[in-house]
Amino acid sequence: MVSLDALALKNSTHLWLEISETEQKKIWQQSQAFSSDSRRWSAYLNRLSLNTFLPWLQAEHNPDATAFPRLAALPSVWEVVNGFGISFGTKRMVLIPTEAVDLSELRVPQEWVDIPSWTADYYLAVQVNLEEGCIRIWGYTTHALLKSMGTYDASDRAYCVDGENLIANLGILWIASQLCVEEPTRSEETVPLQELAIAQAQNLLQRLGNPALILPRLAVPFPTWGALLEHGGWREHLYEQRQGQQQKWSITQWLQAGVSDFAQAFGWHSVELESNFAGARGLESTTELPTLVRTLTIAGQEYELRVKAKNSITDRVWRFELQNAMRGEMIAQGIKLRLLTENLQPFYGNQVQANTPVNKLYLEVALGDTEEGLVWEIEPTPEDFEHEILFF
């Protein structure tokens, strides 16, 4: 094995970061929940690169840098597409790991370029060298250059840039960001995504959720695929189905049998609350139905989103509450709580706003006899937010 310093001497303009053997073993154990060996291996390379690069970036340049989509959502990405994003300051970068020895080009999956909420300013080429225990960042380009100078390969839906057209020295990126240089990093050219009806999305999930389909990302037109993948709730269901997990994010199931492991990874848990004032009045303390709680960070403050049955599960009347996580603290003026249908459509009475500081915001919704999916939104947008579909 060659030392990292010796490798760096071969090309000092590239960034070389060491991976420990302990880290390799730990990450391999974390990268097993995927539908095929190829997806497990791709997830392994991505997680190795993320766990190596992000701490370095936080230590050297931006302590607040975070992964996007959020860490809990990344497995649903790696099940179908290579790469991961990092937000730093007002900018974003996407890293594309590969074991390839050939550094002749960078190939960026179309999802990272043409899905609006996934688009980044910079795209970094990452070579993973497991034999030498390191990753090598050997070049980068911008979204604007990728769209203008790159070529689109329709066979695997990737934008390709010759290695000689990449910027080899990552230090240039940090200098530009530190000097606040207003470079045109993003192209205004967009690929419109399709609006999906609920029935269409459900049919797609049934078809693409079959793990025997090796490349679901190539099985339908990109505008359809991109719309399905951009919706965090639909993408999570696709991932779960490809793992053979047929359970949905069912509120009634969570209340009766406990919050699913998948949902716990996103921060959901249940609590049992005593009826208000029972103890204070000398009455026997009674326990209500469990309440489902999701902790959120909004504009730097901790809040709790609570979901509970207003009376009983069978009544089908549900209450969504938002309140400050600190007892006695108020909800800030201007915050909005909103509910949408599964395909993100509004309905009558679906939003409430704090016009002044208030103790809590709440919405109540009465549902029919058939299962329905609801999506919650809050303004300002919570940190690490992705759409989730809660089924009732």
Image (cartoon, helix red, strand yellow):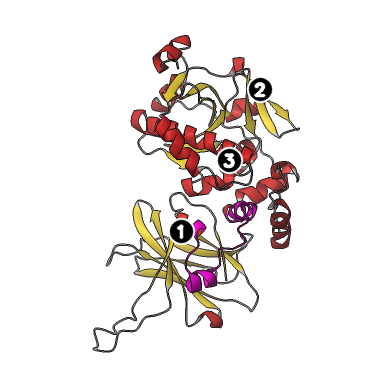
Which residue is found at the position 42% from the left and 74% from the top? Answer: 290
Residue appearing at x 51%, y 17% in the figure: 168
> How many circles with numbers are drawn on the protein?
3
Mark 1: which amino acid? Gln
- Residue position marked by numbered label 2 in the rendering: 149
Q: Is residue 258 magenta?
A: yes
Task: Decide: is 163 above or below 347.
Answer: above
Q: Secondary structure at mark 1?
A: helix
Mark 2 falls on what kind of element?
Answer: helix
Question: What residue does disc 3 label?
Answer: 40
Percent of width and height locating residue 72: 48, 49
Left/right of residue 152 with respect to residue 56 in the rendered view: right
Going by the numbered disc 2, the residue's amino acid type is Met
From this view, report whether residue 195 is shown above or below residue 154. Answer: below
Q: Are marks 1 and 2 in contact (CB under 8 Å)?
A: no
Span colored in magenta: 233-262
Give the residue type at disc 3.
Arg
Between the C-alphas of marks 1 and 2, the distance is 43 Å
Cα distance in 3D space between marks 2 and 3 = 32 Å
